Image: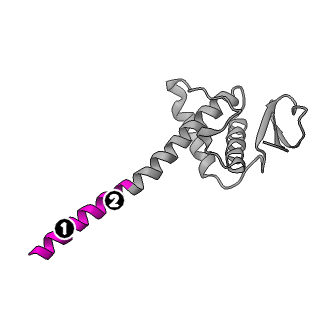
Amino acid sequence: MGLIKLTQRNYAMTSLILTIAFLIPLSAQANEEGCLAKIIFAESRGESIEGAIAVGQATVNRAKRTGKTICKLSGVSRLTPPRNLMAHYTALAQSVMRGKDSIVQNSDSWNTGTKPSRSGKIVRQIGGHVFYVMSRL
């Protein structure tokens, strides 16, 4: 009888630990997606879906290159989309974070119009944005 109670207690504790372990990465992932959605909205306004995805991919590349989370990146604008557009930008962010292929290759920076005078290799232009690899971040 004592063995059964111990097993049930262990099962309950194991279930609780597993639940917490699975929730933490999901909430961190959702937070990163939320930050990316705000960056895509702020930085790609006026662009096509392709341009918005490109901004998202370059943002993810910048985070990887700098070793920072998307939420901690500097040098990017963040604006919360209006409530009626939040689901759209969140879906774009999720798509970018789950995607394997990048339309901007290893670009980690973008600018409207032309590349700034700082050195860096232009990779692609989409709409009004130029995507490039910054020589120094």
The residue at 67%/49% (across/down) is 67
Asked where in the image residue 117 lies, by quadrant, the reply is: top right
User: Coloring scheme of the render?
Assistant: one colour
- On screen, 81 above or below 136? above
The image position of residue 131, as x and y in percent, is 81, 39
Magenta part mainly helix, strand or loop?
Answer: helix
Q: Residue at x 66, y 55 (%)?
A: 100
- Identify the residue at image location x=87%, y=31%: 116
* Numbered range of the magenta stretch: 1-20
Say whether residue 81 is left or right of residue 59: left
83 and 36: which is toward the camera = 36
Left-right relation of 21 to 58:
left
Residue type at mark 1: give it: Gln
**Disc on res. 8:** 1
65 in magenta? no
Name the residue located 15 percent from the left edge and 76 percent from the top edge.
3
Rate crowding at label 2 as few (under 14), some (14 to 19) or many (20 or more) other CA atoms within 10 Å. Answer: few
On residue 17, the disc is: 2
Q: Quadrant of the N terminus?
A: bottom left
The amino acid pointed to by label 2 is: Ile
- Image location of residue 113, percent across then percent down: 85, 28
**Label 2: which secondary element:** helix
Look at the numbered discs 1 and 2 and tell me whether their residues touch, using CB distance below 8 Å.
no
Give yes or no for residue 11 being in the magenta stretch: yes
